[in-house]
């Protein structure tokens, strides 16, 4: 497997294409849902994880808990699966779409592209953040071999969306919702 940032860039490119096809009004609705998911995970994720851990101890395999052999993997998968479930629901079917019609021509294409790139950055960057936060537990599955490249360590990891946006999520989420309602 190549460097992680190469996969990151390719996946963001896929979201850029999706943004071009769907248009920025729908993509802004997804952006709002992604920000809500980030707020949920940053403010309440640990509490939900502890409750989930109690259920695993009571009804499941204790090696899957946070203290077990696969603790880091379970913890990161918990965050990633909740986040990706919200993302999939956001893209599926009738979505929270902002009003308006994308302008035709290069301006419309640029707006669609930028909204797709933003969503790609938020979604793929959040997955990367949770992998990084738990020291890349997918190593257990043979899906990643450390270390990260110097470029990724120096320039990309510090710019992942969760640590950058966390202080502003309590303002960004209501702002996006109000903008949707006012339009």
Image (cartoon, grey):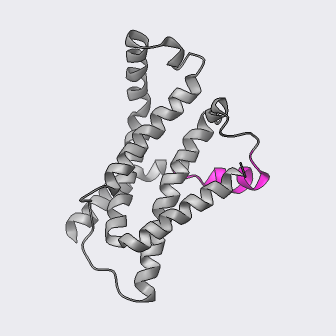
For the point 55% across and 65% down, which residue is it?
A: 13
Q: Quick check: 68 above or below 173?
A: above
The reply to whether residue 23 is in sight is yes
Residue 170 in view here? no
- Residue 166 on image: x %, y %: 47, 48
Q: Nearer the viewer, residue 171 or 173?
A: 173
Location of residue 120 in the rendering, given as x and y in whole percent from the top left corner: 50, 60
What's the magenta bit mostly, secondary-structure-wise?
Answer: helix
Residue bounds of the magenta highlight: 148-161
Seen in the image, is 95 located left or right of residue 151?
left
Name which residue lies at 63% across and 55% down: 7
Horizontally, is 141 left or right of 111 in the view? Answer: right
Residue 160 sits inside the magenta stretch = yes
Horizontal side of residue 3 vs 69, given as left or right: right
Q: Quadrant of residue 32?
A: bottom left
Quarter of the image where the C terminus is located: bottom left
Eyeballing the image, is 29 above or below 72?
Answer: below
Which quadrant would residue 132 be assigned to in this image?
A: top right
How far across and down, in percent of the image, does residue 10 sit?
60, 61
Q: Answer left or right for 104 relative to 139.
A: left
Residue drawn at the location 32% of the way across and 62% of the way down = 29
**Going 38% across and 28% down the picture, which residue do you hit?**
48
User: Can you say whether 12 is above or below 126 in the image?
Assistant: below
């Amino acid at each position: 497997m190549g460097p992680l940032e190469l996969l990151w860039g390719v996946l963001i490119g896929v979201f850029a294409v999706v943004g071009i096809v769907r248009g920025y009004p729908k993509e802004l609705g997804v952006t709002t849902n992604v920000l809500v998911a980030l707020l949920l995970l940053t403010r309440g994720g640990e509490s939900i994880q502890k409750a989930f851990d109690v259920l695993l101890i009571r009804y499941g395999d204790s090696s899957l808990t946070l203290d077990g052999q696969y603790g880091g993997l379970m913890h990161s998968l918990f965050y990633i699966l909740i986040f990706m479930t919200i993302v999939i629901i956001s893209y599926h079917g009738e979505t929270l779409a902002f009003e308006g019609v994308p302008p035709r021509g290069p301006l419309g294409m640029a707006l669609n592209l930028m909204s797709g790139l933003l969503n790609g950055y938020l979604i793929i960057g959040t997955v990367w953040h949770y992998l990084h936060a738990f020291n890349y537990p997918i190593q257990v599955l043979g899906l990643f071999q450390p270390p990260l490249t110097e470029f990724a360590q120096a320039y990309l990891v510090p710019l992942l969306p969760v640590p950058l946006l966390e202080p502003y999520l309590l303002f960004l989420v209501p702002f996006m919702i109000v903008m949707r309602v006012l339009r």
